[in-house]
Image (tube, rainbow, N blue to C red):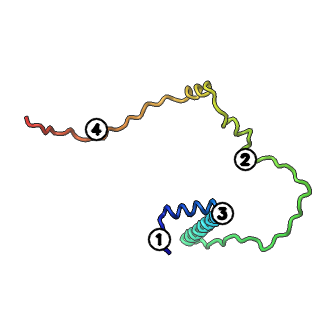
Amino acid sequence: MAHRNPLGRIKDVAIGTWKDPRSTAESVVAQARGTVHLGKVVVEQVGHRIQERRGHPPVPAPRAPVSEPAAPAPAARTPEAPAEDTPTPGSVAPRVARQTPEQKALQDAAKPDRKPVKKAVPGAKLPPRKSTSPE
């Protein structure tokens, strides 16, 4: 395989993404899954080593049940109330709405005045220079 210019590789990926976005998305998802799996493996190994050093026997990893009984389908679907953590359009609207100039002035007035930060002059910490002119 010939070495390729990095810009050529980027161009090829961009064109491939444009031609076949589904396979690109699938490869990104597969890479993300692999990364998550690798992270889980590392965390499990570190956890086991810590437990071994403390003298505790390692805890076996949880396993998925072999087979679960099929649950009957619900007859009618009822709308669920949104969770407290779930933002609703009504709860986000006040935060997103544009502020009037009066509201901005009130917020600015409520903020404490801050002194400007003095920037250090590069030569301020240096000793004074000796004069080089002949006297």
> Is mark 4 in CB contact (under 8 Å) with mark 1?
no
Ranked by sequence position, the earlier of labels 4 and 1 is: 1
Looking at the picture, tell me which residue is in the foreground, 30 or 89. 30
Q: Name the residue at 48% across, 68% down.
A: 4
Q: Residue at coordinates 85% horizontally, 69% vertically from top-left?
A: 69
Secondary structure found at label 4: loop
> What residue is disc 4 on?
124
- How far apart marks 4 and 2 lie (CA) works out to 54 Å
N-terminal of the pair, mark 4 or mark 2, is 2
Helix, strand or loop at disc 3? loop
Instruction: Mark 2 or mark 3: name the one nearer the start of the chain.
Output: 3
Q: Which mark is residue 86?
A: 2
- Kind of residue at badge 1: His
Which of 60 and 135 lies nearest the eye of the viewer? Answer: 135
State the CA–CA distance, disc 4 to disc 1: 53 Å
Judge left or right: residue 101 versus residue 122.
right
- Say which residue label 1 marks: 3
Residue type of the residue flagged with mark 4 = Ala
Q: Nearer the viewer, mark 2 or mark 3?
A: 3
| Cα distance in 3D space between marks 3 and 4 | 61 Å
Q: Which mark is first along the chain, 1 or 3?
A: 1
- Residue identified by numbered label 3: 20
Tell me which label, 1 or 2, sits earlier in the chain: 1
Q: Nearer the viewer, residue 97 or 13?
A: 13
